[in-house]
Amino acid sequence: MGAREATRGDTAKWDPQLVERTMSVLRPFLRLYHRSEVRGLESFPHGGALVVSNHSGGLFAMDVPIFALGFYDTFGYDRPVYTLSHDMLMTGPTADFFIRNGFIRANAANAEQALRSGGVVVVFPGGDYDVYRPTLQENRIDFDGRTGYVKAALNAGVPIVPAVAIGGQESQLYLSRGTGLAKLLRLDKILRSKVLPISFGFPFGLSAVLPVNVPLPTKIVTQVLEPIDIAEQFGAEPDIDAVDAYVRRVMQQALDELAKERRLPVIG
């Protein structure tokens, strides 16, 4: 199946009734356990938009459900929120559930088609590299040099909406991405993963993904920033690296502001 055919199948399966039920189940957990907040949605643009965010929380990253809950509670269920995702999520018995909730395969054709359809697409350029960053670097925007998201927004003719989240990297103590260990075990060839993260958490203590620790009830706040019209701000033929540098700069400034508000780890 070609990439465009796969995308049409994925986006066509978005099920607003299922999404609403999923959000109703997640809402008490996100609001009570993580005391989640989503700020800044009042400036969110109409039509297709590419939400570019940092990624936090390791195996139990809550970035997508927290943003989606805030978005759907604000705007209703008429406009889908899609998330560019690893192919592993699209296999096995749970694949259909995730696709119907808006998860689509992460490639350029999928992103462009979903954006042109008027959907909101969430992308985490840093991927695994970002979501497993050491806790001591939790407030650093680092996409590992990946700029494909800029081209995706340009190709679809939609704005970039930066968003930053804080708190997720306090769900346990992330010690190392384990890139050397992953390379030694050839995980990049086997699982398309360049990391084998080492963390310390509850109840098992030290973990290299396994055993799986329970995330701490850390407060997570997401700040949605002003949309960026690339053509308007950078011209008809923008420098991709310049756009990327600007996006990361405004995100870093916003994340620094959130960090100043935070009084204590986990508690927020």
Image: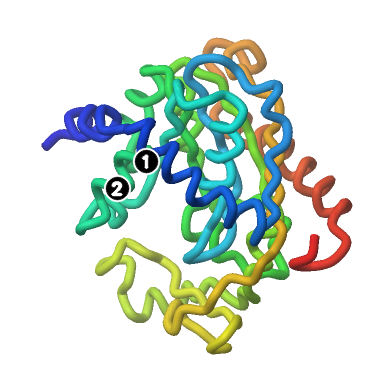
Q: Which numbered tag is attached to residue 204?
A: none
Image position, residue 188 (x, y; %): 33, 66
Quadrant in the rendering for residue 57: bottom right
Which kind of residue does numbered mark 1 sit on?
Asn
135 versus 10 height, above or below: below
Q: Residue at x 72, y 31 (%)?
A: 40
Image position, residue 155 (x, y; %): 41, 20
* Front one among 266 and 256: 266
Image position, residue 253 (x, y; %): 79, 42
Q: Residues within 10 Å of mark 1 (few under 14, many from 20)?
A: many
Residue under numbered circle 2: 97
Residue under numbered circle 1: 101
Q: Residue at x 70, y 59 (%)?
A: 167
User: Residue 109: in sight, yes or no?
Assistant: yes
| Local SS, label 2 | helix
- State how far apart marks 1 and 2 are (Cα): 6 Å
* Front one among 23 and 89: 23
> Is residue 188 toward the left or the right of residue 140 in the image?
left
